[in-house]
Amino acid sequence: MTEQIRKLNEEGIRRFGEWLDAGASGAAPVELLSSPETSVPLGESIIAPKKGFADRYEFGAYLDDILRPLEKSGISSDRGLWTGLALHWFDELCPPRKDGVRKLDKSYRYILSDDYRHYYRHLVRSPWQLVRDHGENARFLLTSPRESDRPLSVHGEILEQFGGRQQVLGNRQLIAEASRLYLDPETGRPRKGAAGSGAGSARRFGMVLRQLDLTYDAARMEDGKLLDILPAEFDRWKKEAGVKGGWSSWLGRGRRQRNA
């Protein structure tokens, strides 16, 4: 089905929130998006055909494409737009089970929150912003290691680990380096173990970055330099990514330079 997108006004957001709070039973109240009492035009004609998506990266690329006529700075924090788009795609974000019951997540997954702790967790805005900011390098943040029959409903552990630090999530260089480390180019999905908590995982990457921040300006390093100084626990990941060198080789090189 093809629909011209409108955004929810405050009344529309309130009614959508009430429906969520009541358990989201029955059909999603998409009529809120067409009623002048609960929605307003976007200012540009945006057509959003309903279609399926293999993963959240594909969804984000689609959103980036259809929303190009709108200024990024003007829509990035537009609560009515992102909440309205969540309602528009609600059956994909929170599909009903065979018994008709939906497995609801927190409301901030669907209604854009003003709280910085939840802002990046919105299931529609985050894919759009990540693809718009990072392109292909956002793929490892928006895909899961395995295929899912509910691909748009899951925020993902890797994104959760990176999203808590906006200075990392918004830095193109850091995300490019992390993508090189964690994305399997053959499958287009994160490497096995990237979403876990073991050595060299995305969780550990964030922790190590915090330690490195005390000594280095990791966000401004040249291509490859960040991976070069990661400690030994990341060697397995660097080997899979085809990255040469490591913590010990970098330290040795630094000592030689100081002694020259």
Image (cartoon, rainbow, N blue to C red):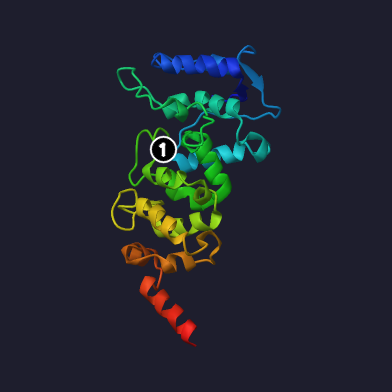
Q: Residue at left 55%, top 42%?
A: 129
Question: Where residue 93 sits in the image (x, y, percent)?
Answer: 43, 29
Work out whether residue 183 can be spotted.
no
Q: Residue 80 at x, y = what percent?
A: 59, 25
Question: Vertical placement of 211 versus 95: above or below?
Answer: below
Compared with 212, 72 (above or below) is above
Looking at this view, is 223 or 29 the one in front? 223
Q: What residue type is labelled 1?
A: His
Question: Is residue 163 or residue 146 the one in the foreground?
Answer: 163
Instruction: Give how far across and how far down residue 242 sits, in percent.
Output: 39, 68
| Disc 1, SS | loop
Q: Is residue 176 left or right of residue 206?
A: right
Q: Does residue 155 sit above or below 203 in this rendering?
A: above
Q: Residue at x 49, y 64 (%)?
A: 216
* Image position of 241 (left or right of 79): left
Q: Mark 1 points at which residue?
A: 155
Left or right, 32 with respect to 103, comes to: right
Residue 220 sits in quarter: bottom right
For the image, the number of numbered tags is 1
Instruction: Pick the residue in front: 211 or 17.
Output: 211
Q: Residue at x 48, y 33 (%)?
A: 122
Number of other residues with Cα within 10 Å of mark 1, as a class: few under 14, some 14 to 19, many 20 or more = many
- Image height of 76 relative to 165, above or below: above
Looking at this view, name the residue that lies furthest to the front: 214
Image coords of residue 7 (percent x, y):
61, 23
